[in-house]
Image (cartoon, rainbow, N blue to C red):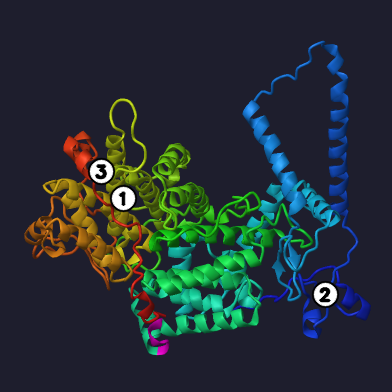
Amino acid sequence: MSTAKATKKSAFSCEPCRRRKVKCGGEQPLCQRCAARNDECIYKLNPTLSYTQRLEERIKELEQQVKNLVSSPSSAPESSHPSPPPPSNPDASTQLSHHASDEAGINRSFRGLEVDDKGSITYHGATSFFNLPSDRNGNAVSDISYLGSSSSDTDSQRRDRLINNAWHQRAMENLSEIPEPFQYLLNVHWCWIQPLFNFIYRPVFTRDMQSMGPYYSHTLLNAVISHSIRWSRSNSSTRRILDEQYQGGIVFGKQARAMLFQELSTGVCTIPTIQALLLLSAQECSQGNSTQAWTYSGIAFRLIDHLGICVDSQRFPGSVPLSDEELEIRRRIYWGCYFWDKMICLYLGRSPSLQHTSISPSHIMFDDSAENDLWVPFGIPQTDPTWKYPPKTAHSASCFMSMCRLLVIFNEILIHMYDPLSQNTDAEIQACLDSQEPLLQQWWDQLPVHLRIDPVSLPALAPPSHIVTLNCLYHAFKILLYRPMLTGRGQCEVEGTSPIQRYLVESVTSATSIITIFDLFCRTFTMNYCVLSLAYCVYISSSIFLLQVQAAPDDNQAMRKLTYCIQCLQQVRQISPVIASALNNIEKELTAIGIPLETSPQMASQAQSSPPAGSTASASGSVYQISPEPNRPLPAISHPVFQPSFSHNFGPDAMSIEPGVFETMSTLQPLSIRVGAIQGSENRAPNG
């Protein structure tokens, strides 16, 4: 591997090094010399010129505000009936006033971040052993945080520094020499996982991997490798190395867990600890090990609190000065945790742990350099040497930001419609629908064109996988917003036509959109590269088709779509065993209406004849196949001339529903939103 400096030198020295007159590395929050000598590392520096200038500018701003306030009353006597002129935007003025008032209240009560006796950044509330009530301390923190927020060091300057560093680190990464299979498995992660979840800030991880810096750990590397293995089975050389030298890859998962518990036992946990926990949680969830998945994620979310990452470190720095890089990392890991919190709650049917509050990190990504990266489906074997997937712009930064905004909306749906711990009332469900439906539509209307997939006019090839998942999750969340109304929840007494008809049409349209987009994904990338969140969307769409079949067993179109979902889930089960629970749910419901899963009419007919527009795609491992014609050669797995294996029609006829279905559907019980098997999952063997 290439070498790099292990530490970033500083022009300043801590007090112990200054007293001993030795060279100080300037590491924050604890320099190496003080760490080795177990000394208290304190930086008592004179204010820099830029800091002094920022203070002076802030003083000028405050003086101008005071001057304006003083001059305002003098104009009052000009009128015998004085009334303030209406603002140009009353709502904006009111919101600004309320926001300023809220900020002032938070600043008075919140003390900001601090460094504990182990050198870790943390925070403690007013009731803790670590704080005494003190107006003086509270005001001091308020002043510091307020000054920090008005710094003349503009966001554009911060963005430029981060992007320049990111490009520099990417160039250094290309020069590094990481042995196989590690390089291959890292590339798998950067392609299929990182753009979607953003658990890891790539520039600092790859840099610190060379220098053993603070944002790399062997625990995290083992977790990344272990999580990436299931996407690497199609590569024969990588699979051979894993089988011959690493027990098929199981050793990486074992090492990650062993080192993780060692970190927890010492009580010194870092951001890489959180990242490793998230990856292990995602891996265990896919395997159906719900106990491990829920526990790992819970520890990660607790550490988010413990390390103060749940706090906007830019607005509330306290006594801990953080660099641009540190602020960027903390924001990203917070939103990565927020994302995973909502997804694992969906999979397992639990209540979300993380809530976005007034002191949470802002929804900003200053380093958006990954937006313009070229994305290609790494690792997919090419059976046709004359054709390759054309590189596309990744748009990973805007995709992740859009995903986070979508999840903030869905969090309300999850709490007020699907809270497993409290029975949501019909009035609460209806209020949630009324408030979140326009927000969901607004999100879609504001979604950039380059992130939007039109199911009616599909492209020839699927866009990058994270964009596919974003679109499918939007439609899944839309279904979950309307689905309670289809089964008699909410308060639907309104004048005119019952809104359940509109809810059903919207749900069926979204469910059909999901399987249409999913079919495009499978024809482009094969089923092997389907992430669990994408499979979950197929499960949610199947719940709508199942309701249609339960209400009208002779509905061939609904049965055909349901059959497609079942066949897809059966194949995804080979790489994500947790899907077995979802299939069991569907089988029970079909059996109850006299349609066994193995012998459903649609499946029986498909076993003997090809679908209206058939297509197959094969790959080493699982096979994506929707009843091909006998003796028909399988086409290449990555070829631009595939024909859709699912013929769709979004015209009025496709959405037409018999009036009796609406009344029947209101008496049905929908599928659980949970796909995670709880019973018996504790006994599953851990999968490395």
Q: Which residue is mark 3?
A: 666
Q: Which residue is mark 2?
A: 41
Between circles 3 and 1, the one closer to the viewer is 3
- Residue type highlighted by circle 3: Ser
* Residue closer to the observer: 176 or 20: 20
Looking at the image, residue 274 lies above or below residue 317: below
Q: Earlier in the sequence, mark 2 or mark 3?
A: 2
Q: Position of residue 560 (x, y in %)?
A: 16, 51
Q: Position of residue 179 (x, y in %)?
A: 50, 81
Q: Which residue is mark 1?
A: 514
Q: Position of residue 222 (x, y in %)?
A: 50, 79
Q: Residue at x 51, y 56 (%)?
A: 373
* Residue closer to the observer: 506 or 80: 80
Horizontal relation, residue 580 to residue 139: left or right = left
Q: Which residues are drawn in magenta? A: 245-249
Looking at the image, residue 250 lies above or below residue 579: below
Q: Position of residue 108 (x, y in %)?
A: 77, 50
Query: What type of secondary structure mainly makes up the magenta span?
Result: helix
Horizontal relation, residue 70 to residue 363: left or right = right
Real-space Cα separation, disc 1 to disc 2, in angstroms: 55 Å
Image quadrant in which the N terminus is located: bottom right
Q: Element at badge 3?
A: loop
- Residue type highlighted by circle 2: Cys
Q: Earlier in the sequence, mark 1 or mark 2?
A: 2
Real-space Cα separation, disc 3 to disc 1, in angstroms: 23 Å
Looking at the image, residue 375 lies above or below residue 289: above
Real-space Cα separation, disc 2 to disc 3, in angstroms: 66 Å
Mark 2 residue crowding within 10 angstroms, few (<14) / some (14–19) / many (20+): many
Q: Residue furthest top?
A: 80
